[in-house]
Image: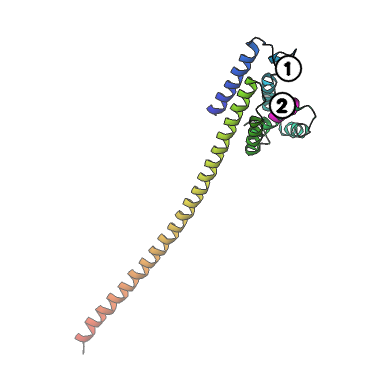
Amino acid sequence: MIFYRAFAGLLLVLLAACTHSPAHKSTSPGLRGFSLSQTQHTPELLAFYETISDTNADAHKAMLAELNKPIADTRQNQLRQIKLAMLLGLPSSRIRDTVKSQSLLQEIIQANNLEPTDTALVNLLFEFMTDANRLIKVKSDNKAQQQRIDALQQKNEQLQQKYEALEQKLDALKKIEKTMGDRDVISPANP
């Protein structure tokens, strides 16, 4: 729980940094006339995070259907892919699939065409999904180990019961042997 709060706090810090940073003019030929703040998606993504947290499972399913629709604009498509990864991976989502989310984020990172703050957010989300998947694997492994331990304990209890039953039979046989031995000792004295 502390991890999720720290994650949310870090997202808010990134949002605050984005809203207080001055807009720098881009020197890229394809983006002339746009400031970096117009091409950065971090504030929109953080607002989307809030939306995920505040909506129910039906709304999440509707968002999933909407985000899975491809669009022609590659920048907007990339934004939709990030939103899809967030919807699938964040703890407040009702349709979690952290493995698919991590895969989407990996593809976005490998494309290497995001603004620096967007890249930072995507890398943060990717690390979060990696840790979440690792935690899920550890929990799964622990559950499997606990099942093996439970099975071994059950076998141990069964063997203990068999041991006690055999010990009771052995004690009964010893009593029978002793009574037969006592009878044999008494019988030779009486001819």
Which numbered marker is on residue 29?
1
Residue at image location 52% in from the left, 45% down from the top: 141
The question of residue 133 being in magenta is answered with no
Q: Earlier in the sequence, mark 1 or mark 2?
A: 1
**Left or right, residue 99 beside residue 63:** left
What is the x, y in percent for residue 145?
49, 48
Which mark, residue 79?
2
In which quarter of the view is residue 170 placed?
A: bottom left
Q: Quadrant of residue 75?
A: top right
The region drawn magenta spans 75-82
Residue 62 screen position, x and y as percent: 77, 33
Q: Residues within 10 Å of mark 2 (few under 14, many from 20)?
A: many
Q: Main secondary structure of the magenta part?
A: helix
Amino acid type, callout 1: Pro
User: Measuring 46% from the left and 58% from the top, which residue is drawn there?
Assistant: 155
Q: Which mark is residue 188?
A: none
* Nearer to the camera, 7 or 30: 30
